[in-house]
Image (cartoon, rainbow, N blue to C red):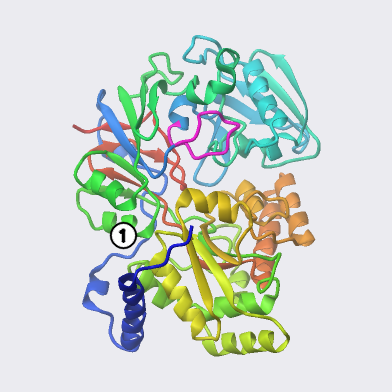
Amino acid sequence: MLRWPSALRWCGALLAVAALVLTACGAPQADETARPTITSTKPYGGDPATEGTPKRGGTARIGMDREAVSFDTTVQNTNSAAFAVYDTLLKVNPQGVAEPYMAKSMDTPDGGLTWRLGLREGVMFTDGTPLDAEAVRINIQRHIDKVTSPAHALAVRIAAMRVVDPLTLEIALTEPFGVFPLMFAQPISTGSLGVIISPAALQKYGADIGSHPVGAGPFMFVEWIRDSRIVLERNPNYWQKGLPYLDKLEFRPLSDTESRYASIQNGDVDIIYGAFNEELVRAVQDENLTVYYGEQNGGELLYFNFNRPPFDDRRMREAVVRAIDLKALSAVHYGNQIVPADSLFTAASPYHDDAASTLWPTHDPARAKQLVDEYRASGGNPDFVLKTVNTWLDFAAFIQAQMAAVGITVKVEVYDLAQYASQVVQSGDFDLSTTVGSFDNPYPGAVRLLSSTGNQNYGKYNNPQVDDLLDQAAGTVDETQRQADYREVEKIVNEDLVFCWLSRGFVSTITRNDVKGVVRYLFRDMYFATLWLDR
């Protein structure tokens, strides 16, 4: 599908750029100085000590930014309701360490080659069957057997599993893997070994398990009317006594950004998952709403296709980076609230090295034009096609203008989100494309983006040194060594210009002020047992 920005949107984007250039040397505009700067705010949830005594009962209505595909953990999709039905065996703390949650323990006696998972006594699935070591083994085996599972690449590291007793599962790996516990704390979208389905339900529903989920989480599945709602109700036999507080959860797919934001403004929903900058900027300024946002690693970026011209040549990648004025982009596309990115990890990350940021090319249109001229003189054609989603029309017009200024003609093709995911990025059919490559933890986040076999390495970047460093960082149980490995990866990525960094991501959780007890990961996935309504 080919769509072009309307003349109005096109002119608006160019006028915004012109306005920013004209005022660049003067004082900030009044409306800019009055606007709050986007910073991390309640990144991991609320503070129970200041929220008061939780109230019981009620239904929380949650607006998702897309429809779920399945509750089957072996099916690639984003499902916001999955944590409510299943919980996770382990949970990642704000320091990035996996800690016991539904499971009691996980440790290694031999430096990461063998792991023992200890389960809590008395944890039951909502069908009345026990969540025991055999149930965990069966679920992990599904990921091993199904090549398309998002957790398959994690599961094939397993050489053998042994049920020691009903509450202990021993897992032997093919090689030491120091970050293995993290795999039991991830959401199903990134691949999780710690989201467990009732084996009895697997046997009963077979291939249709994705529409009939049975877990041991705080809520039980009631109904799923696709493109309308997912309804869950309180699990009376939940493993955390006294929880959950709410009676029901109702998840609604609201894919349109404007209608999703309007729904929380007018109270039709209590919570939304924000996907873009515009929601976050507006919500921060709305006294009726509470924002939960944390700056993530990675972010909003441009993918270069390393498999074909012109971006198989580093000169052209550098030309694009140097041609883009992030201050002007902020005015056009980010409401003057960009959170600029220039490296794989945020400045606050223990895996960040300032040396990586100093390697990142600065905005320099003259140098960009020189690189373009050199490439053209060597026989290359610098013109390319930019493919993006139809909500980024202003961005596409901006990139066309910026590239034209350095001698590159850009053709724009835009798609709806579903088409874009399948026909463009996943197929690798692009010269330059847009995406959000945000992640909480280096593993598996950085591996998915950068490894030669990474399932989000859509540009087909391939550097054996990076592959080796990523493997070494994942394998070691020495955190000092892990940090050194990832810092080296970060520097190489900027030297190779794997991506064109634009901004950190803006995924957020936005709630009405009477929603309390929020517990979340930076990438919005929530734990729902502690959620309550102050009404």
Instruction: Say which of 515 and 355 sits in front.
Output: 515
Q: Position of residue 505 (x, y in %)?
A: 46, 57
> Which residue position is annotated with label 1?
281
For this view, does 246 lie left or right of residue 306?
left
Q: Position of residue 309 (x, y in %)?
A: 68, 72
Label 1 Cα neighbours within 10 Å, binned few <14 / some 14-19 / many ≥20: many
Residue 78 versus residue 119 in the image, above or below: below
Q: Residue furthest top?
A: 128
Q: Position of residue 28 (x, y in %)?
A: 28, 80
Magenta extent:
68-81
Where is the C terminus found, in terms of image quarters? top left
Instruction: Say which of 248 and 148 sits in front.
Output: 148
Amino acid on which disc 1 is placed: Val
Residue 314 versus residue 445 in the image, above or below: below
Residue in view at x 53 percent, y 86 percent: 406
* Quarter occupied by residue 182: top right
Residue in view at x 73 percent, y 41 percent: 177
Q: Position of residue 367 (x, y in %)?
A: 58, 88
Element type at mark 1: helix
Residue in view at x 66 percent, y 72 percent: 311
Residue 391 versus residue 64 in the image, above or below: below
Q: Main secondary structure of the magenta part?
A: loop
Residue in view at x 25 percent, y 30 percent: 53
Examine the rendering and report whether any part of residue 338 can be seen: no
